[in-house]
Structure formats: C-alpha cells, structure tokens
Image: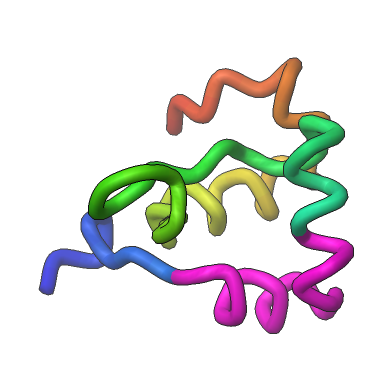
Amino acid sequence: MNQSLKLIDRRQLAEKLGISIRTLQRWLSMGKIPKPIYLGSGRRLPRWVLSKIDHWIMSNCPNANNWNGEQK
C-alpha cells in the first residue's frame, strides 16, 4: 500500500501520540488534532491518513484548527 494512503485507527493514533483513546477523543472535540475521515455509515469508523499525521507531528503539532495539512 502506498504510504500516503495508509490509514490508522483511534488505537493506533493514540499509541503513536502516547495518549489514551479518551484523551484522543477529547483532543479531537477540542480541535487539537487533525480531523479523521469516516468509513462506513455514520461516524463509527474514524481513520487518519498516516502521512498527514506524520506531517502534523513534524510541524510540532499545531492546533488543527490553524493547520491546513498541506505538505511543502
């Protein structure tokens, strides 16, 4: 699979950030992390594009509301 298309779930993202899933949910509702894409019906399967998360981390984890997610 192409690295730019690799998706990670809540558990994988929380582990990558060294936080609990509960903290991840709180940060998401506060706009502190990039918004996920949702798979399936409803909003039950959030996934994040790994390359965008890596870029966000390399950008020193700015508040997601102020970060456009574009790689330069």
Count all numbered tags in the image, as a single digit. 0
Q: Quadrant of the C terminus?
A: top left
Instruction: Say which residue appears at 45% left-offset and 26% top-offset.
Output: 70
Q: Is residue 18 above or below residue 10?
A: below
**Residue 57 highlighted magenta (yes or no):** no
Q: Quadrant of residue 56?
A: top right
Q: Which residues are magenta?
A: 9-24
Q: Quadrant of residue 51?
A: bottom left
**Residue 13 highlighted magenta (yes or no):** yes
Q: Nearer the viewer, residue 45 or 55?
A: 45
Instruction: Say which residue appears at 14% left-offset and 65% top-offset.
Output: 2
Residue 60 at what x, y percent from top left?
A: 80, 46
Q: Residue furthest front?
A: 42
Residue 1 at what x, y percent from top left?
A: 11, 73
Q: Is residue 2 above or below residue 46?
A: below
Magenta residues: mostly which secondary structure?
helix
